[in-house]
Image (tube, helix red, strand yellow):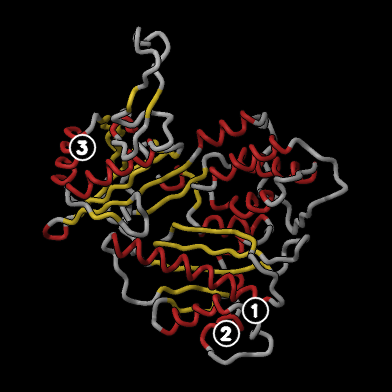
Amino acid sequence: MAAQNSWPIYQMDVKSAFLHGTLDEQVFVDQPPSYIKVGNEHKVYKLKKALYGLKQAPRAWYSRIEAYFLKEGFKKCPYEHTLFVKVGSEGKILIVCLYVDDLIFTGNDVWMFKKFKKSMMIEFEMTDLGLMHYFLGIEVVQSTNGYFISQKKYAQELLNRFQMQDCNPVSTPCEYGLKLNKDSEGKKVDNTLFKQIVGSLMYLTATRPDIMHYVSLISRYMESPTEMHLLVAKRILRYIQGTKQLGLFFKKGEKSELIGFTDSNFAGDQDDRRSTSGHVFMLGTCVVSWLSKNQPIVTLSTTEAEFVAASNCACQTIWLRKILEELHFKKDDATIIYCDNTSAIKLSKNPVLHGRSKHIDVKYYFLRDLNNDGTIVLKYCRSEDQLTDIFTKPLKAPSFQNLRNLLGVCMMQQQS
């Protein structure tokens, strides 16, 4: 939204944030070595403020900064507790997002920026980092065309860490039609190393939705990985080697209409025959939310699998709509969710129980209520136009690269 409205994004850092927290409990600590008071060796200190390493410190700091924001006229978002919004006169708005001691903020009024910075520096010891360029491992480029976010530096560190910096690149994260299983008879590998690779790749998905499904796939085998699973993980690293510079580009001045896509891969898990749910949400021409996850139940048909996936997608739709409403981007019209299964669409609208669907858990039927009250509307799209395919199954290189481009994943040079 900042890119679409040409709002600058700034960043600030709170120095020694946890030391600002006030304790609600009585906490005592031993006298530190070399500072023990002679004659009172049996006594302890009572803490008045939080310290780093104290279990209560993060909560105490959040309570402190929350109280400050509320005092300054901000409203805390009830659906995302690190998001604070302040609305002024004549449509002026200031949006602040907090991550521990790092703050990023944007809005449409320079005077509100200056007042906020001055107030923060009076209340806390701050570091003004200016325009946001680097945040939690994510590189940000704010240009005249839009905003580009990537993790090029982190990707290179990832390759160096696992000694894959000289590997040969590949065009896709895994081979077309790959079917993984537990491989009980396969040779076991170091599960600590495997978990480190998976965890590191999972963080990379913050700006790389194109690898989301494949990282989710190998994460199912972290308990007892084999050489087969490690080879797939290394294949993903080889793909990263050739695509380090890819990221997400958010164009300026685009229409901010939220659109969703939902899909499933029926019985894709070779071990328990569960289906894979996938969904993606676009705001303009770039992706803002995505998911690839095993379904919690075994479904008996493609229709049932698609219906369960659509229900999960609807949950995310509600949350995103509420977030947008808090940011004063309220949308009264129904959010369109595209699905390539006509039977699932009919099931979401028709209240009649069918012999093949009457066993579906009632919790998934709230999709019908959302459809009836105008919150969402499921519409049909052709399979070749289904963006969520990249989150549910391994694809051929041309299809994979086409969907990757449609998600807004690109290189910065392509947008210069």
Tell me the quarter of the image containing the N terminus: bottom left
| Disc 1: which residue | 303
Q: Residues at badges 2 and 3 in contact (C-beta under 8 Å)?
A: no
Kindly identify which numbered label has been placed on residue 120.
3
Q: Residues at badges 2 and 1 in contact (C-beta under 8 Å)?
A: yes
Q: Is residue 348 left or right of residue 193?
A: left
Query: What x and y, as percent, mark residue 236?
Result: 66, 44
Question: Quarter-wise, where is residue 62 in the image?
Answer: top left
Hey, what amino acid is under mark 1?
Answer: Thr
Q: Residue at x 51, y 58 (%)?
A: 290
Q: Is residue 98 left or right of residue 199?
A: left
Q: Earlier in the sequence, mark 2 or mark 3?
A: 3
Q: Nearer the viewer, mark 3 or mark 1?
A: 3
| Disc 2: which residue | 347
SS of the residue at dot 2? helix
Query: What x and y, as percent, mark residue 230?
Result: 74, 41
* Disc 2 from disc 3: Cα separation: 53 Å
Q: Residue at x 34, y 44 (%)?
A: 98
Kindly identify which numbered label has been placed on residue 324.
none
Query: What x and y, as percent, mark residue 45?
Result: 34, 22
* Disc 2 from disc 1: Cα separation: 9 Å
Query: How would you rate the neighbour count of disc 3 (Cα within 10 Å): few for under 14, some for 14-19, many for 20 or more?
Result: some
